[in-house]
Image: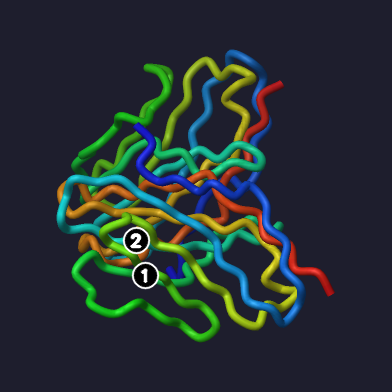
Amino acid sequence: GAGVSQSPRYKVAKRGQDVALRCDPISGHVSLFWYQQALGQGPEFLTYFQNEAQLDKSGLPSDRFFAERPEGSVSTLKIQRTQQEDSAVYLCASSFGQMNTEAFFGQGTRLTVV
Amino acid sequence: AQKITQTQPGMFVQEKEAVTLDCTYDTSDPSYGLFWYKQPSSGEMIFLIYQGSYDQQNATEGRYSLNFQKARKSANLVISASQLGDSAMYFCAMREGRGNDMRFGAGTRLTVKP
């Protein structure tokens, strides 16, 4: 596709429900990033993939958060037993693998846990 | 540990004036890249400018320039001839050669006054 695509754009979940957020990166981009952005804050790093390998998951806030990218393209961020503090915008970004290449961002998924 | 620091939560500038947004960073990796992104109220993240750690000259892109002071570990964004459409959040980010993931600062909210 022309850009990074995230779905759904908006998600309302009841507390305790599991959710899955999808990211379709730009074709050919080997690097994929997930971020969590609270209102008025900067994007907080969650996890990073190089192709299908999850090279860094140090930002995942708890073991309720899980991300995968099994074929090195589409990625899914799963949150189990959602809690109110999980409410945020989840941003996905992709780039070529080199350090000097910018990341292109999707529009984000706004998750609201009620 | 926080690697990117943006000390100005909010900045105001008069239309047509220049403004500098501060960013300092911390890394022990000699190879790294520095990025600035703009996030309007609509939420999308827009790439503005890139500076590599080995670049001899400061990066420029139209009205954007980067004041890169390597010894001080600072990478300030300069916007010349501010326009009303420049009002947005601005984020500084770093991508290290070793880890290759991308981390962001907390951001600066810029407001351009007519």
Q: Which residue lies furthest to the front in this view?
A: B72
Residue B34: which numbered mark, if any?
Answer: 2
Which residue is pictured at 60% across the width and 35% down the height? A88
- Residue highlighted by disc 1: B50
Q: What residue appears at the point 48 percent right and 71 percent down from the top-left corner?
A: B48
Q: In this view, does A53 lie above or below B65?
A: above
Q: Residue furthest bottom?
A: B62
Asked if one can make out residue A54 in the rendered structure from this viewpoint, the answer is yes
Residue A50: assigned label: none
Tell me the element at label 2.
Answer: strand
Residue A96: image location, x then y, percent: 26, 64
Total labels: the figure holds 2
Q: In which quarter of the image is residue A60?
A: top left
Q: Residues within 10 Å of mark 2 (few under 14, many from 20)?
A: many
Point out the residue furthest to the right here. B114
Image check: A88 left or right of A27? right
Q: Do the residues labelled 2 and 1 touch (CB within 8 Å)?
A: yes
Q: What residue type is labelled 1?
A: Tyr
Q: Nearer the viewer, residue B28 or B106?
A: B28
Crowding at label 1, few (<14), some or many (≥20) Cα neighbours within 10 Å? many
- Viewer-side residue, B65 vs B35: B65
Query: Residue at point 30% right, 43% down?
Result: A48
Q: Which of A21 and B67 is in front in this view?
A: B67
Q: Which of marks 2 and 1 is nearer the N terminus?
A: 2
Front-most of A72 and B40?
B40
Disc 1, SS: strand
Image location of residue B54, percent across then percent down: 19, 69
How many angstroms separate mark 2 from mark 1 (CA)?
6 Å
Quarter of the image with the C terminus of chain B in it:
bottom right
Q: Hey, what amino acid is under mark 2?
A: Leu
In this rendering, does residue B42 appear at all?
A: no
